[in-house]
Image (cartoon, helix red, strand yellow):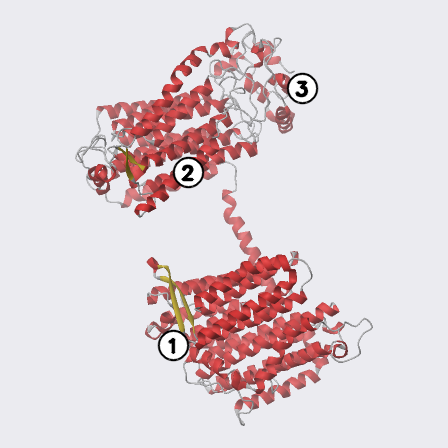
Amino acid sequence: MAIALTVGVLVAGGVFMMLRRGMVRVVIGFMFLNHGVNLIILAAGGADRRGEALGGSPDPATTADPLPQAFVLTAIVISFAVTIYLLVLAVTGDADDDTDLELTGREMETPTFIEDAGGSTALPADELGPRAVRRTGSHSSRRRRPPGGRP
Amino acid sequence: MSLLVILALAVLLVPAAGVLGRRAGRNAGWPLAVGLLALAGGLVAVWDDRADPGGVVQQVPWMPTLGISLGLRLDGLGLLFGLLVLVIGAVVVAWSSRYLGSGGHASFYTLMTFFAAAMLALVLADDLVVLFVAWELTTLCSFLLIARSGPEGRDPAIRTFLVTAAGGLCLLTAVAVMWAATGTTRLSAVLADDVWDASPGLAAVVAVLVALAAFTKSAQFPFHAWLPDAMVAITPVSAYLHAAAMVKAGIYLMLRFTEALHAVPVWNVLLVSVGLLTALMGAVLALQRHDLKELLAYSTVSQLGFLTATIGIGTEYAAVGAAVHVAAHALFKSALFMAVGVIDHQAGTRDIRALSGLARTMPATAGIMVLAAASMAGLPPLLGFVSKEAMFKAMAHSPAPDAAVWLVGTVAVLAAACTFAYSVRMLTVLPGRAPADAPREAAAAFLAPVAVVALAGPALGLAGSVAEPLLGAASTAVAGSGAEPDLGLWHGWSPELFMSLAVFGLGGALVLARRPVDRVLGRRSFPVTGVAVVEAFRRGSIALGEQVGRPTRSDVPRRHLMPPVVSLVALAAVGLLTVEVPGLYGDPSTVTDWVLLVLVLIGVALALRARSRVGLLTIAGDVGFAVALWFYALGATDVALTQLLVEVLTVVVIVLLLNRLPSTFHRTGEVRGWVAAAVAVLVGAGAAAATWLLTDRRALSPAGRYFLEEGEEQTGGTNVVNTILVDFRALDTLGELTVLGVAGIAIVVAIESRGLLPKRPSPITEPDASPIRSPRDNMVVLRVTARTLGPVIVALSLFFLLRGHNAPGGGFISALIGAAGIALVYLTAPDDRVSRMRLPYTRFIGAGVVVAVVVGLLGLLEGSFLRPLHVDVLGIHVTTALVFDVGVYLAVVGVIVAAISRLGVDEKEPLPLRHAGSASSVLHSGPPATTTTSKPHSRETAPVGTVHDEQDRTRPPLPERPDPFRGAGPAAGEGH
């Protein structure tokens, strides 16, 4: 019962994260989903036998099924590699869903205490041709060099 | 010499043709012609040496588990078509050596010999699979040969391919049906099976499928459009395609299946009706054309119609008629195409209206054309007359009702009369006065190959008995020995003679009434052309594909993620309602489980509320640790260890990219949030229900029991999970390793090609004097730790690697530990630009995969890929599974190092110059973990961000820069 509920919580949380904006959120949602699915696979081996499959001649009556464990082990490592790849996609290329604010005119989910600190009052994005501003911004930032690098 | 050797030599001729075509240019045609003729000689030799009068059979095992063998069989039909393929091929390539221009012709000769080899394989195939493969190869060859004729060849090539490949799919279906029905793929056995008599329905299905395949290949109505369309190809290609290769494949297929299908009514009706319609239509269209080559193309369509109709009659004598006409058509059509090619080459045009007086200026070519065209018109004493008589005889003696026989005879006579008329029309270029810039006669070497095939017409017409054994063997192979070909010119006053006389009369009238005929035909006879229909199909299918794919053409991840998730919910709902669930084996939940559930619940709830990326990352790490504890609680020690290490390394990687992203997330819209929440709750409930209802309801699985009981005995290892990974299911692990390697390479490629986003200004805005500004000083603790722990961690990882077979550890875990050590060293650098790691990560990945594969190949010594070998070295038991684990280790470390070293620094950024007291030049030493300020998004949102402002703001914090913590006013006003 506890496993089933844990799986439900992880899957629901993962799916909710994946359906919101921002690549990092999607990636974290993907990780939660991985956790949930891995738990399902382990549960498929049966949660009533929990002995470690180690040492000479383990007792089949009390030892956990080793086959799902092997599956999950490889699954973890593969999903790790995919997670890294997804993370790389979040920070390569042009400004996109993760960085691009003006595209939709939405505000950041800024914690209120920082808003109070000032500086983040977002003006209506379409007021001054946000697209143009963004383009100029990202281009100039690409040409930018670290200050010490100039000979 | 055996059939296999001949086929192998034909295949070997293909690369030889490539080399020759590059070295010798167009002259490569001569040696290739000699080679093809030698192969034809080989075929005859094999035939003469046969022990069984029926033919020669050779079987070579190919896919024994499926019962498929490389079966070859040479019977009379195969011999006839094989000789046509090789001899006409030889003539055409010999002729090409003068037709082509100077320069390299490697691709042309390669494709022509490949075509010949594919056709040879087709006619020798005694296995359905081999037959189908060869069939598809001929489609491919014709596509390539048409496509290489330049930009205007592109669309015709694609249309040809689409039409003939559609026929290929029909043949594939037919092959599958026949294989399923007869249980064998051996062609001769399939054809002789009694299933054709036993189940008429099946026979009808196969008959329609085979007929459709043959119709597309042999350009029968309504698939005829591709053949004239393909006229853009150079003339040698057309000559070969029309005379012996591509279109004859369809005729061969129909003749081959006559043995099984000749009594199936659908087969007879379909072939005779479509064949005669095509014959008449093609002949009329040919009469309409002024381009000699186009005229010949429609003539081929018409002649193939005659053949199809004759085959469809299905009697013994019909097989004779078809066999004779196949040979006759191959000879006169190749001669005509090459003669037209000669005229085109010398005169620069193929238009009947622009040419005249060729009899005077090019007498030899004119003589060849007369011979070949007379054979096509069916005039005695040429082979064309004999073959047309044979076909008429088959039609006149068909077992069909009288009315049908009369109808068939009438249509055939009409079509043949049109054939007579357009054959004569071709010759109108010969008489008349030669223009001033008259073309000169071609060289003897250019004309010799054409003359050979053109003279074969009268020679075989007069001395038909020479060809009787070959054609008799062919017709016997098709329809049994009931009919012997009688190739004499005079058969008495028989119906076929009257038909021929009618043809000459009607044809003569058509020739004499040329002007009125032209007036009638000059109007467009069909409102739609076949090419337009094919083109419309092609465009339609592309447009349809666009419509089908439209929903997925979006950059928004939600669009791609939502459909599978929703269908999963639907699946779960169906499952809940329909699946009968067995009783619970016992609820095994313990107190620990409930504690862990609460931990996960808290983690997930916090993650959903997190607004900043750092916060989310921290909480996600906590959830990962809780899940690792879950694994441990379930007795999966290795899995728990792996999860723990992966969690650590994921955090390291995310930390590296946080300073390229805004610190907080976008606000999600209300509606969207609610939809997402609803879907998420449904999926979560479905997953929980499925887990609850489908697990814990049975005892230990048999596989699990086997691994637990036999693991140590079979592998010598006591860590059962690891023995599964490297011994029992090593192939899975090898696949996984490869996936990892690909992910690593993909990471490097993605960063290399797309570039990293620029770094954001550090939100840490401490004054210069603050001790926090100096990363070097800040790193002291970590650096000392790393210096001490580094070697220990490496040693630890090796220890885990070595003991993995017997205790928790193994390739994955040890590699993750090692990578964690490397990550620690990386994090202790004062500046990520100076800590650029020089480890050759791509080589690590490659070496890992190579080591694993080589170990797998060593296993072949023991009989199976990836079987571990056990060796005792100096009394220590060593297994190659350990070496395999080393491969795993290398690949995993490679991937992680690739990510760390490529993400940490944009390699295009130059190294900073080291000023004295360069504290201020070192800024982005880590994530904005301690103080989160509004700085990053003030850059994003301030609309007045001009270029200068941007640069100013992204420079390192300069002394005069206003600090948001000192007062809200200046920060808010910045940039205005």
Residue B816: percent from left, percent from top: 38, 27
Looking at the image, residue B171 lies above or below residue B755: below
Q: Front-most of B396 and B377? A: B377
Residue A35: percent from left, percent from top: 35, 31
Looking at the image, residue B568 lies above or below residue B874: below
Chain letter belonging to callout 2 = B
Q: Are marks 2 and 1 in contact (CB under 8 Å)?
A: no
**Mark 1 closeness class: few <14, some 14–19, many ≥20 residues within 10 Å:** few
The dot on residue B948 is: 3
Amino acid type at image mark 3: His
Say which residue label 1 marks. Answer: B51
Q: Are marks 3 and 2 in contact (CB under 8 Å)?
A: no
As helix, strand or loop, the secondary structure at mark 3 comes to helix
State which tag comes first along the sequence, 3 or 1.
1
Q: CA distance from mark 2 to mark 1?
A: 54 Å
State which tag comes first along the sequence, 2 or 1.
1
Q: Are marks 3 and 2 on the same chain?
A: yes
The dot on residue B849 is: 2
Q: Are marks 3 and 1 in contact (CB under 8 Å)?
A: no
Foreground: disc 3 or disc 1: 1
Foreground: disc 2 or disc 1: 1
Chain letter belonging to callout 3 = B
In this picture, residue A148 sits left or right of residue B138: right
The dot on residue B111 is: none
**Mark 2 closeness class: few <14, some 14–19, many ≥20 residues within 10 Å:** many
> Is residue B222 at all visible to an observer of this figure?
no
As helix, strand or loop, the secondary structure at mark 1 comes to loop
Amino acid type at image mark 2: Val
> Is residue A39 at all visible to an observer of this figure?
yes
**Mark 3 closeness class: few <14, some 14–19, many ≥20 residues within 10 Å:** few
